[in-house]
Image (cartoon, rainbow, N blue to C red):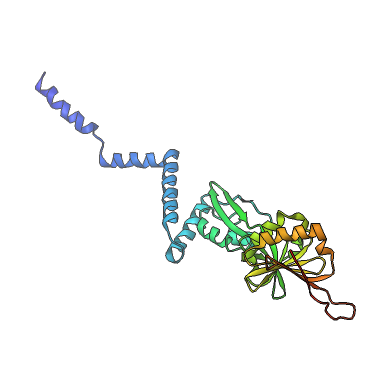
Amino acid sequence: MSRSRRAATPRNSVQDRPTRLKLLLRRQRKLLRPAGWITFAGIVCLLGVVVLQSAKPGGTIATMRERFGAATGTAGLRVTDVVIEGRANTPEPLLRAAIGVSKGDPILGFSVEEARARIETLSWVEHATVERRLPGTVVVSLQERRPFAIWQHQGKFVLVDRAGQVVTNQEVAQFRTLPLIVGAGAPAAAAPLLDALTDRPALQARIVAAVRVGERRWNLRMDSGADVMLPEGHETAALDRLAQLQQQHALLDRPLAAIDLRLPDRLLLRPKPDADGAPAAAAKKPT
């Protein structure tokens, strides 16, 4: 090979090598391609989601979330639908106010945890979940408290659930078929008694109210006007005894003011006052 040809090869290689300016222009052109923009936008969104998930509410982080939400809203990520599942009794205006998001809001501009916490402060709501389903749907799922009884206390009527938690004092009349419990401490102690009465429908149908006495035991106010006094901690046995007495002697159909079942070996009956208003003599009857 001639010397001139050997010398020409390195000169051509130097000329073919891209300059820094050409490399920069190539990178810019790649960035301007649609796929590049999509990737870039995805990275930005992912970074934003990570920041939002790791941030605590309040202060500068809340401001950052608002700004990020506004930016993504401008990019088209807005709420198009708010789906509510499991709502039966929770007032919808209160629920939507607690959610704090409506159609058209930036979907990344709010905290799902803060929304869930607000929803769970509503008295009807036992548990809630809030999901963001991109690009534009927010799903709220509720588990509502189930009314178990109507509690009369200090002249007011409220709904309570099985655990004794107050549900609401609004529109209680809609649930008038629920059992009525009365007195301090009644909600927390009512479930075992009401379950026992459910298993004894003939007695349950005659009961007007279950009254908690001294936060220790129960009296049953019957439709005849009589008060059935149950022993503390032995309600089930006393109910079986009452059912047997009713079957054999129609005790609940007699003019009695009180039926005392607190002692297992005897039955104390107090008649209603006579026509002159004087109380009749108390009757004592063996079991």
Give the residue at the far top of this rendering: 1
Give the residue at the far front of this rendering: 286
Residue pictured at 71% horizontal, 72% vertical: 156
Residue pictured at 54% horizontal, 61% vertical: 117
Nearer the observer, 67 or 88: 88
Nearer the observer, 106 or 273: 273
> In the rendering, at what x and y percent does residue 266 appear?
71, 67
Whether residue 89 is visible: no
Nearer the observer, 253 or 224: 253
Nearer the observer, 153 or 212: 212
Residue pictured at 72% horizontal, 75% vertical: 155
> In the rendering, at what x and y percent does residue 76 appear?
54, 49
Residue pictured at 42% horizontal, 59% vertical: 55
Q: Quadrant of residue 205?
A: bottom right
Question: Quick check: 178 left or right of 84?
Answer: right
> In the rendering, at what x and y percent does residue 56 appear?
43, 61
